[in-house]
C-alpha cells in the first residue's frame, strides 16, 4: 500500500508543467531574498550564521522519508551530499554579497552566473546540448539580467561591490543544481530530495569545523539566550522565511527533476523581476535597508529588461521540455 501511495505521490508531483513550477518557485524565492536582506541588515549580521540556521531547517525534508526514501548507492549519496555542500557554501557567499550591495543587484548577478555555468556544466557532465533556440533564449535572459543589475551608464564602481561573492555563489549553486540533476536521473524525486537536504544539514555542520564560523555560530546561541524577546521575534520571521524558501526550493527542484537544468536555471531570470518590484515598493518605507533610487531612465531600463526576460521565457514555453536537446 505504501508503494502505491509513493508512486501516486510521485506521479501527482510530476503532473505539473515544469515551467509553471519553476516560475512559482522563483516567485517565492524572490520573497525570500527580500526577507534575507532585512534579516541580514537588522537581525542576523553574519552570513555563515544565517546559512547554518538554513541548513538546520533543511531536516524538515525528512517528513517525506516515508514516501520513497531509500539507500540508492554510495555514488548517488555522495552526489546528493556534494550538491548540498556546494549550495550551503554558495549561500554563505550570497549572503556576504547581499551585505555589501543592494539585493536587487546581487540576486540578478548571481542569477546571471548560474545559467552560464550550467550550460558548460550540463554539456560537460550531464550530456545536455543547447539547440539554436536555447542559445538565443539564454542570451536574451542574460542580457535582461544585466540590465536589471546595473544602471547605465555606470559612473563608479560601487555597483561592483560584492561581485566576487556573487560570482562564487553563482558557480557553487550551478554546480549544486547540476549534481542534483544527476541524482534525479538515477532515482525518484522524493528520494533525491531527502538525500540532498541531508547534504544541506551536513554542510551546515561542516561550518562548525572552520574556527571563524564556529565562533560566530556559538556567539549567536549566547546572544539568543541573553535577548530572548528579540530572539523569538527574529526566529518567527526566520521561520516564515524558511518555510517560503522550502516551498520555493521544492518547486524548483521538482521542475529540475522533470525538465532541463539549464532551462530551469534560465527561467530563474523571472525571480529578479519579482525582486525588483518588491524592493521598489519596500524602499519607500525601509529606505535604509533597500536603498532603491529609481528615476525615469532607470524605470525605462528596467522595463526593457523585464520585456527581454519575458521574451526569453516565452521562447522556453513555446519549445517546452525539448527546448534543450538531451543526448543521454
Image (cartoon, grey):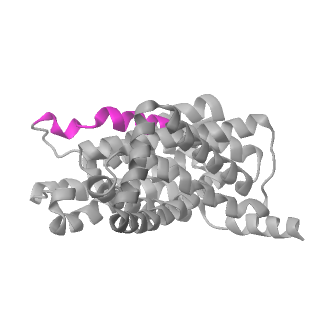
Instruction: Locate residue 222 relative to residue 152 in the image: left or right.
Output: right
Instruction: Locate residue 125 relative to residue 42 in the image: left or right.
Output: right
- Residue 129 or residue 285, whichever sits in front: 285
In the image, residue 140 above or below residue 306: above
- Across and down, in percent, residue 322 comes to 62, 50
User: Residue lying farthest right?
Assistant: 1
In the image, residue 144 above or below residue 248: above
Residue drawn at x 17%, y 46% is 151
Q: Is residue 177 visible?
A: yes
User: Residue lying farthest front?
Assistant: 226
Q: Main secondary structure of the magenta part?
A: helix
- Across and down, in percent, residue 170 comes to 43, 39
Indicate the quadrant containing the C terminus: top left, top right, bottom left or bottom right. Answer: top right
Q: Is residue 325 visible?
A: no
In the image, residue 246 above or below residue 109: below
In which quarter of the view is residue 236 placed?
A: bottom left
| Magenta stretch bounds | 156-172
Amino acid at each position: 500500500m505504501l508503494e502505491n501511495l509513493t508512486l501516486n505521490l510521485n506521479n501527482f508531483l510530476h503532473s505539473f508543467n515544469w515551467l509553471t513550477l519553476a516560475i512559482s518557485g522563483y516567485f517565492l524565492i524572490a520573497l525570500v531574498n527580500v526577507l534575507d536582506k532585512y534579516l541580514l541588515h537588522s537581525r542576523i549580521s553574519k552570513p555563515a550564521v544565517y546559512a547554518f540556521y538554513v541548513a538546520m531547517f533543511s531536516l524538515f525534508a525528512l517528513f517525506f522519508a516515508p514516501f520513497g526514501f531509500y539507500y540508492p548507492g554510495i555514488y548517488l549519496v555522495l552526489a546528493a551530499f556534494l550538491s548540498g555542500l556546494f549550495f550551503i557554501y554558495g549561500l554563505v557567499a550570497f549572503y556576504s554579497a547581499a551585505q555589501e550591495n543592494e539585493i536587487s543587484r546581487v540576486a540578478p548577478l548571481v542569477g546571471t552566473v548560474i545559467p552560464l555555468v550550467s550550460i558548460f556544466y550540463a554539456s560537460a557532465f550531464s550530456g545536455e546540448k543547447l539547440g539554436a533556440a536555447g542559445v538565443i533564449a539564454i542570451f536574451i535572459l542574460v542580457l535582461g539580467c544585466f540590465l536589471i543589475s546595473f544602471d547605465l551608464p555606470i559612473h563608479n564602481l560601487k555597483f561592483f561591490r560584492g561581485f566576487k561573492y556573487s560570482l562564487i555563489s553563482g558557480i557553487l549553486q550551478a554546480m549544486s543544481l547540476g549534481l542534483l540533476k544527476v541524482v534525479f536521473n538515477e532515482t525518484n524525486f522524493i528520494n533525491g530530495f531527502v538525500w540532498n537536504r541531508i547534504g544541506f544539514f551536513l554542510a551546515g555542520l561542516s561550518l562548525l569545523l572552520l574556527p571563524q564560523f564556529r565562533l560566530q555560530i556559538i556567539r549567536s546561541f549566547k546572544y539568543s539566550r541573553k535577548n530572548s524577546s528579540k530572539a523569538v521575534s527574529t526566529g518567527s520571521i526566520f521561520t516564515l522565511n524558511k518555510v517560503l524558501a522550502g516551498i520555493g526550493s521544492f518547486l524548483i527542484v521538482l521542475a529540475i527533476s522533470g525538465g532541463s537544468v539549464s532551462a530551469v536555471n534560465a527561467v530563474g531570470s523571472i525571480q529578479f523581476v519579482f525582486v525588483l518590484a518588491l524592493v521598489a515598493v519596500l524602499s519607500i518605507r525601509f529606505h535604509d535597508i533597500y536603498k532603491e533610487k529609481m528615476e525615469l531612465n532607470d524605470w525605462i531600463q528596467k522595463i526593457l529588461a523585464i520585456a527581454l526576460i519575458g521574451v526569453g521565457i516565452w521562447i522556453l514555453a513555446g519549445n517546452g521540455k525539448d527546448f534543450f536537446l538531451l543526448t543521454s
